[in-house]
Image (cartoon, grey):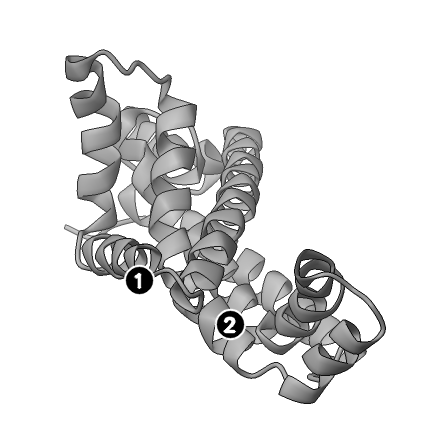
Amino acid sequence: MGYTLNFAVVWADFHNLLWGLGLGLVLAVFAVAIGSGIGLIAAFASVGPSRAGRIIVRLYVSIMRNLPILVIVLVAYFGLPQIGIRLNKFESFVGSLALYSGAYLAEVFRAGLMGVPRGVVEAARAIGLTRLQTSLSVVVPIMLRNVLPALGSTFIGLFKDTSLAAAIAVPELTYQARKINVESFRVVETWTVTSALYVGTCLIIAAALRRLERRYPKF
């Protein structure tokens, strides 16, 4: 028996898909913002003088990069309440995604820090800037400019990873698509439209990032 395509049900709930898409983008933005903070701190610790700090960063990066992100999400949402730490589904998911991305960004930022010319740092110190002022005003801007392509790729990856939020009933795009699919049984239509939304959004983000990279070339 042939399968007849009928997109009417999907178009009727298209606004829910768009709302879920917007929520996914918001989750990714918060996650990459928090993850960047974590990664930046970890990167400075990894190149710092403290041996303990370097060991802690290596352990964090090693553990996070070798755990499936879904496991991290499930532990945060279902496991932490067992030890008295209660987070709602949005907080637990963003926190999980931030910790996961922070491990990858720590390595990205570490490479960026190592690529900052030594002469620039010495010049900043020569004009009287403190170590903190040099880091915030000179090193970090140059490093961020140099790692912008990797940071952009991480954001796109995090946006796609927001689909895992459906596992804990966060109503992002995949959750909305699954809801439509279950209610209408229009499998092909639902996931075709959902896939197109994911692909189209990622292409738009990538194009915006390429334009940003051209505007702020590497140092």
Image quadrant assignment for residue 97: top left
For label 1, the SS is helix
Number of residues whose C-alpha sits closer than 10 Å to that of mark 1, classed few (under 14), some (14–19) or many (20 or more): few
- Estimate the x, y position of residue 137 in percent, counting from the top left: 76, 62
Task: Give the residue drawn at x 43%, y 53%.
Answer: 158
- Estimate the x, y position of residue 35 in percent, counting from the top left: 47, 48
Q: Earlier in the sequence, mark 1 or mark 2?
A: 1
- Estimate the x, y position of residue 24 in percent, counting from the top left: 49, 40
From this viewpoint, is residue 59 visible? yes
Image quadrant assignment for residue 48: bottom left
According to the picture, the residue beneath numbered tag 2 turns out to be 150
* 53 vs 149, nearest the viewer: 53
Q: Nearer the viewer, mark 1 or mark 2?
A: 1
Task: Give the residue drawn at x 42%, y 56%.
Answer: 42
Q: Is residue 140 left or right of residue 29?
A: right
For label 2, the SS is helix
Quadrant placement of the C terminus: bottom right
Number of residues whose C-alpha sits closer than 10 Å to that of mark 2, classed few (under 14), some (14–19) or many (20 or more): some
Q: Is residue 122 left or right of residue 73?
A: right
* 32 vs 143, nearest the viewer: 143
Q: Which mark is residue 51?
A: 1
Q: Is residue 123 left or right of residue 149?
A: right
Tell me the amino acid under the disc marked 2.
Ala
* 96 vs 171, nearest the viewer: 96
